Amino acid sequence: MMNDQAVVAIGVDIGGTKIAAALIDTLGNISHRQHQPTPTTSAEILLETVADMIQAILKDAQLNLADITGIGLGVPGKVDAENGLAIYQNNLPWANFPVVEKLQAIFPNTKIAIDNDVKVAALAEYRDAVLKQDEIFTYLTISTGIASTTLINNKILRGAGFSGEVGFFPTGQAEPFNTLEKLAAGPGIQRKARLDYQNDTITTAEVFADWQQQTEPGFTIVESSIKELAQAIYHMVCYLDPTAITLGGSVVLKNPHYLNSLNKYLQQWLHPEQEHILERIALSKIGSDNGLLGSAWLVID
């Protein structure tokens, strides 16, 4: 049983392969975790799975709906946060799906909010960075895809609703046309390696192992991908001049030497007035929990 004075919310992080949910309090403590594979057969089955996980957390924590401040969800793809709609995703069946309306029918009189999964992760990282008023913060995730979110004064910069898609940045390669995501995300690195190694079974982890040992062709493949990412970050620094940048996602978090190589390339291009960012680019300390925490902050705040 939770303390009667504790303010808690349920955070739900929905991924293409796995759903994570948990109880979060205002100090960021995580408890009563639930994990389930993501069902992709229908929109309603996915909704039922999420609802069942929320019910399981309430039961396990011996709480009623009235005991929590709300339910927040991070959803991949394009999200209309204001109207509670999941617009579209690559691998999920929630096309123009009214997530908030559907969940409020199951959990009446409960505050429910959704947002894009990278944006909620960025919200958690922003809070962890503890910046001053008007300081700009950028979160960049490099995993199966590449995306970013920028915040200032606790507000997400959304643009017209599809901001932060830096994975679409064109790379320095003129021919054939490639995007940053195709070269620097995990699947892109693996795809390039299978061509260069002439091995259809090699994994991204094995390529990074060769990179660490400076063994070819893995070393060149990874270094090239890091250089492309460094150039993308340089563009972001030139445009936004953020005070701090946090990097997340499996590609960087599983390879701690990645940041050193990234900074080596970035330093070559930075103007002296921009070099302060080298001390403020950091790996996420929250890791894969940032989606859970950020989704909860949607309703705790």
Image (cartoon, rainbow, N blue to C red):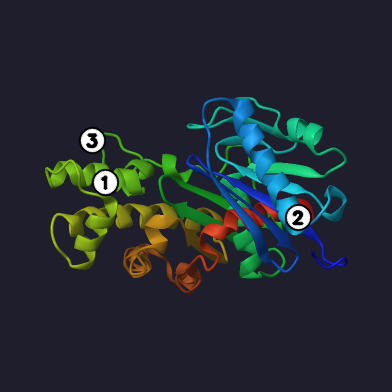
Dot 2: within a 10 Å radius of its alpha carbon, few (fewer than 14), some, or many (20 or more) residues?
A: many
The kind of residue tagged 1 is Gln
Dot 1: within a 10 Å radius of its alpha carbon, few (fewer than 14), some, or many (20 or more) residues?
A: many
The kind of residue tagged 2 is Ala
Label 2 or label 3, whichever comes before in sequence order: 2
Label 2 vs label 1, nearer the camera: 2
What number is the disc on residue 175?
A: 3
Left or right for 171, reference 87: left
For marks 3 and 1, give the CA distance.
20 Å
Question: Pointer 2: what residue?
Answer: 9
Q: Is residue 203 visible?
A: yes
Residue at image location 33% in from the left, 52% down from the top: 228
| Nearest to the observer: residue 207 or residue 4 | 4
Q: Are marks 2 and 1 in contact (CB under 8 Å)?
A: no
| Label 2: which secondary element | strand
For marks 2 and 1, give the CA distance.
38 Å
Image quadrant for the N terminus?
A: bottom right
Q: Is residue 74 above or below residue 135?
A: above
Left or right for 134, reference 282: right
Quarter residue 173 falls in:
top left
Question: Pointer 1: what residue?
Answer: 190
For marks 2 and 3, give the CA distance.
49 Å
Label 2 or label 1, whichever comes before in sequence order: 2
Left or right for 58, reference 45: right
Dot 3: within a 10 Å radius of its alpha carbon, few (fewer than 14), some, or many (20 or more) residues?
A: few
Percent of width and height locating residue 296: 70, 54
Image quadrant for the C terminus?
A: bottom right
Percent of width and height locating residue 257: 33, 69
